[in-house]
């Protein structure tokens, strides 16, 4: 129970941080915000890597492998497309 | 590497994610922010790879190579106009990955011993499976709608709300069973199956122009699914990242709803944008009869010749016509003539939050020319000519002036306050809300009936000749 409360604490505080940081993002950057935050949600890749590599059973390995593929698409695609978009935003020369 | 070092590395990664998002507070710092965030991800992945639990690497490497290749090719090739679909599908992959990871952890725990499924583990697995299943399939439907593979219309049928309610209850029931009887892993997969159908049922009845809300909401769900998976694995970096993304999606969802003056429940369940609105053409004829003034590019060029301040209002039609480069050329030409040019952008213009800004940035329009609704609305009274291209409902004065229309109360761009309004549009057909737009019949409004891109190009040529 102690551990659950500890990670619940982290969860709640992280939600507050998220609200504070993201309300400061201007509307012109809302699309890059979505693709960039999408890339961040690809963090499940670390869980996927452990499942795919731990060789617990065939089923968990298959699930892990599929999860690695999905999460990597998210991470690589998300960061690259965000970078592509942000590179286009230029001020007055 | 010891567990403590791994956790410290995860803390660094989580901090970099926060700093990365903080960088997005200004276009100048945004590129660096995104790179910091990517660095955080890289660190997290590397320390995970040297974890002692990992026995064989071939599946990991194969998965990263395959996923990386798909992600990279797709991200570099996708046109900016297709960005809503791209983000929509990415949300789905995020949700899908969360379900698969939670599922693998659940299978592992149930093989180990019944005691391995604690209450925290069980509830978190259930949340991850339900939210992730809804996100994955809901995102696929959203992708299909935006890509034009399935009908963009709001598809409703009798009793659909009841059906959704039943599926939700069934999903919850299967989830509870999966916690109570962890030795029967099929309950978990039944729950994921039910959540998948629920995801489809939830998005199918939502019309095309409401997609910004849906995409933002699914973005939030993909974050929540990741956070739930963090609770499954008792992993802090997953929880922190997932909550950041969940909060981000939630904020965008509420901004979009506010910009349409509708509740989330109304967007999700009212089925706006279905077939019902098409019988209402008669009052529109009354409204437009004899009052609509059709114009030509030459005439507009003449009006522009004497203008000092011009505002351009883009909408989804500009994206469909791929007219952003043509619009940029026109804006540059007008500026070269000493005219002040600005772009006024409504929050829900397009098919995702910020859609118009990305298209105009792609066409090299400097970001300081792009004005948000509130700022833009302070300037229309001093504007000589406003050019509306491919937008309709977001400039409909009924939203401001009339009671009891589907748009009433929605904040709009007050383009009718400017001296002259030029509306570039193919026909007088109503927008997504299905109601006529009195702006088109206003005394100061000129209609340029044409395809968006052709019209802007002709206009540019005509301005050149004046």
Image (spheres, coloured by chain):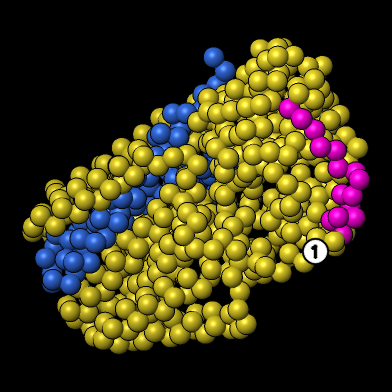
Chain colours: A blue, B yellow
Which image quadrant for residue B368?
top right
Residue at the image point whose x is 68% and y is 15% from the top: B464
> Residue B227 at what x, y percent from top left?
40, 60
Residue at the image point whose x is 17% and y is 61% from the top: A52
For residue B91: magenta? no
Q: Tell me the chain of label 1.
A: B
> Residue B285 at what x, y percent from top left?
86, 55
Q: Is residue B15 above or below residue A12?
A: above
> Residue B246 at what x, y percent from top left?
48, 56
Give whichever of B200, B286 is nearer the camera: B286
Provide the secondary structure element on which disc 1 rests: loop
Residue at the image point whose x is 72% and y is 58% from the top: B433
Whether residue B211 is visible to the viewer of this picture, yes or no, is yes
**Bounds of the magenta segment:** B283-297
Give whichever of B25, B277 is nearer the camera: B277
Horizontal side of residue B282 vs B63, given as left or right: right
Give whichever of B435, A36 is nearer the camera: B435
Which image quadrant for residue B114?
bottom left
- The residue where tag 1 is placed is B280
Farthest left residue in view? B55
Q: Is residue B89 above or below residue B394?
A: below
Which image quadrant for residue B205?
bottom right
For residue B290: magenta? yes
> Residue B441 at what x, y percent from top left?
87, 44
- Number of dots carrying numbers: 1
Horizontal side of residue A84 vs B459, given as left or right: left
Horizontal side of residue B389 vs B102, given as left or right: right
Residue at the image point whose x is 32% and y is 84% from the top: B187
Q: Is residue B171 above or below residue A9?
A: below
Whether residue B308 is visible to the viewer of this picture, yes or no, is no
Crowdedness near tag 1: few (<14), some (14–19) or many (≥20) residues, C-alpha within 10 Å: few
């Amino acid at each position: 129970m102690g551990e659950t409360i500890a990670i619940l604490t982290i969860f709640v505080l992280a939600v507050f941080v998220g609200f504070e940081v993201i309300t400061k993002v201007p509307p012109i950057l809302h699309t890059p915000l979505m693709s960039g935050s999408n890339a961040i949600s690809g963090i499940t890749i670390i869980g996927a890597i452990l499942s795919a590599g731990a060789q617990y059973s065939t089923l968990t390995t298959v699930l892990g492998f599929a999860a690695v593929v999905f999460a990597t698409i998210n991470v690589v695609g998300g960061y690259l497309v965000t970078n592509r978009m942000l590179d286009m935003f230029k001020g007055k020369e | 590497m010891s567990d403590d070092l791994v956790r410290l590395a995860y803390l660094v990664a989580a901090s970099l994610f926060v700093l990365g998002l903080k960088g997005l507070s200004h276009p100048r710092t945004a590129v660096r922010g995104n790179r910091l965030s990517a660095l955080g991800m890289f660190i997290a992945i590397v320390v995970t790879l040297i974890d002692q639990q990992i026995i064989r690497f071939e599946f990991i490497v194969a998965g990263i190579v395959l996923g990386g290749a798909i992600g990279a090719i797709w991200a570099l090739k996708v046109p900016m106009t297709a960005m809503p679909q791209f983000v929509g599908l990415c949300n789905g992959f995020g949700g899908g990955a969360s379900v698969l990871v939670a599922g693998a952890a659940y299978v592992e725990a149930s093989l180990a011993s019944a005691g391995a499924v604690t209450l925290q583990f069980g509830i978190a697995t259930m949340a991850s499976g339900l939210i992730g299943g809804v996100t994955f399939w809901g995102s696929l439907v959203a992708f299909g709608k935006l890509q034009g593979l399935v009908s963009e219309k709001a598809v409703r049928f009798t009793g659909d709300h009841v059906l959704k309610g039943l599926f939700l209850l069934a999903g919850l029931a299967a989830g509870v069973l999966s916690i109570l009887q962890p030795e029967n892993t099929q309950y978990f997969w039944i729950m994921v199956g039910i959540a998948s159908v629920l995801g489809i049922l939830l998005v199918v009845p939502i019309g095309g122009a409401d997609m910004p809300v849906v995409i933002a909401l699914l973005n939030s769900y993909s974050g929540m699914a990741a956070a739930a998976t963090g609770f499954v694995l008792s992993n802090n970096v997953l929880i922190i990242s997932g909550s950041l993304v969940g909060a981000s999606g939630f904020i965008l969802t509420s901004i979009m709803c506010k910009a349409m003056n509708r509740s989330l429940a109304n967007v999700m369940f009212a089925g706006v944008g279905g077939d019902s609105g098409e019988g209402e053409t008669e009052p529109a004829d009354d409204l437009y009869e004899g009052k609509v003034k059709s114009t030509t590019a030459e005439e507009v060029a003449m009006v522009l010749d004497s203008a000092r301040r011009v505002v351009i209002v883009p909408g989804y039609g500009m994206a469909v016509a791929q007219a952003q480069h043509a619009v940029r050329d026109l804006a540059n030409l007008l500026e070269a003539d000493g005219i002040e040019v600005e772009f006024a952008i409504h929050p829900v213009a397009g098919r995702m939050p910020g859609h118009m800004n990305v298209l105009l940035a792609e066409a090299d329009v400097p970001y300081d020319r792009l004005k948000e609704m509130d700022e833009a609305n302070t300037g229309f009274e001093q504007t000589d000519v406003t050019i509306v291209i491919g937008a309709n409902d977001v400039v409909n004065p009924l939203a401001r002036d009339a009671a009891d229309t589907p748009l009433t109360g929605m904040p709009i761009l007050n383009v009718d306050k400017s001296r002259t309004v030029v509306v570039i549009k193919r026909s007088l057909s109503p927008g997504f809300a299905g109601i006529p737009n009195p702006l088109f019949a206003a005394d100061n409004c000129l209609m340029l009936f044409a395809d968006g891109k052709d019209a802007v190009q002709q206009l540019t040529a005509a301005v050149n000749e004046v």
